[in-house]
Amino acid sequence: MFDFLSQTFRNFKHTGAVWPSGDKLAREMTSSLRKSSGPKRILEVGPGTGAFTSKILQSVRPGDEFHIVEINPFFCNVLEKRLLEPFRNRHPDLNVELHESPIESAPIEGAFDHIVCGLPFNNFPPSLVRGIFKKMLSLLGENGDLTYFEYAAVRVMKAPITSSESRRNLRRIDAHGKRLHRRHHGSRQLVLANFPPAVAVRLFQPTS
Ligand SMILES: C[S@@+](CC[C@H](N)C(=O)[O-])C[C@H]1O[C@@H](n2cnc3c(N)ncnc32)[C@H](O)[C@@H]1O
């Protein structure tokens, strides 16, 4: 918790939250992995201190591949020491790779069956949001799913306290989310038992 807070104060633009996600949200964000059968390729973007990572690790089986992309070297270090090193010691045969990089230029190749994304999109400029979704969707295989989250009613809550330019940006990000939702048969699941309450949004990659 302290690790997360320290990075929130140093780097709010990238961290974008004051609190790591709770267990209920982590379960919702990773639910499609537990329904999946057969070998799968999984990508997590923006793990922070690993609220979703620890749940994903519980679903990794022989033959699977799990790639993690995190921009912040401090979080990479925490993840490696707390979760990944002990996991690799227990399961030397399982394939888990951490990439210290922004997702925009991460050295990874698709296709992934599941992408779990913890990025704080409402803190980013709209052009960056569009670029990141384009990249993630290009990495998503046919019938794959991409799950991200946003805080419930975040735009309504932020609107009165931000500048008119920020409000315009939030509206653009919202509009982009709605377009993706239509194009990728999106579904939304409200998780009230999180601080703050959040919505897990799932997008699907249709078969071509
Ligand atoms: C809101 S925190 C979420 C952490 C965790 N998933 C959770 O829910 O508790 C966002 C994370 O995304 C990372 N991040 C921000 N921009 C990124 C980018 N362009 N590429 C990869 N990671 C990024 C931040 O460093 C931070 O760890």
Image (spheres, rainbow, N blue to C red):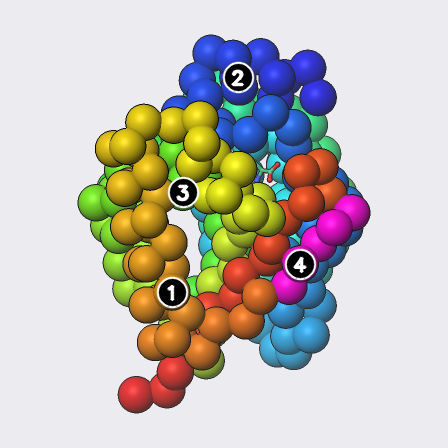
Query: For the residue labelled by badge 1, is the local secondary structure a helix, a strand or a loop?
Result: helix
Residue under the image location 51 percent in, 54 percent down = 148
Q: Tell me the number on the disc at residue 178.
A: 1
Res. 120 visible in picture = yes
Frontmost residue, 87 versus 53: 53
Q: Quadrant of residue 184?
A: bottom left
Query: For the residue labelled by badge 2, is the local secondary structure a helix, a strand or a loop?
Result: helix
Other residues around mark 4 within 10 Å, as few (<14) / some (14–19) / many (≥20): some
Residue kind at label 1, given as amino acid type? Lys
In the image: residue 198, left or right of residue 119: right
Which residue does the numbered mark 4 point to in the structure image?
A: 190
Q: Which callout, 3 or 2, points at the residue further toward the start of the chain? A: 2
Residue under the image location 67 percent in, 38 percent down = 196
From this view, report whether residue 207 is shown above or below residue 133: below
Which residue does the numbered mark 2 point to in the structure image?
A: 7
Residue 164: x and y in percent read: 28, 32
Residue kind at label 2, given as amino acid type? Gln
Circle nearer the viewer, 3 or 4: 4
Residue 95: x and y in percent read: 55, 52
Other residues around mark 1 within 10 Å, as few (<14) / some (14–19) / many (≥20): few
Res. 33 visible in picture = no
Say whether mark 1 is within 8 Å of ligand 1.
Answer: no
Q: Which callout, 4 or 1, points at the residue further toward the start of the chain? A: 1
Say whether mark 2 is within 8 Å of ligand 1.
Answer: yes
Q: Which callout, 2 or 4, points at the residue further toward the start of the chain? A: 2
In the image: residue 133, left or right of residue 196: left
In what quadrant of the picture does the C terminus appear?
Answer: bottom left
Q: Which residues are magenta?
A: 189-193
Distance from label 3 to label 2 (Cα)?
17 Å
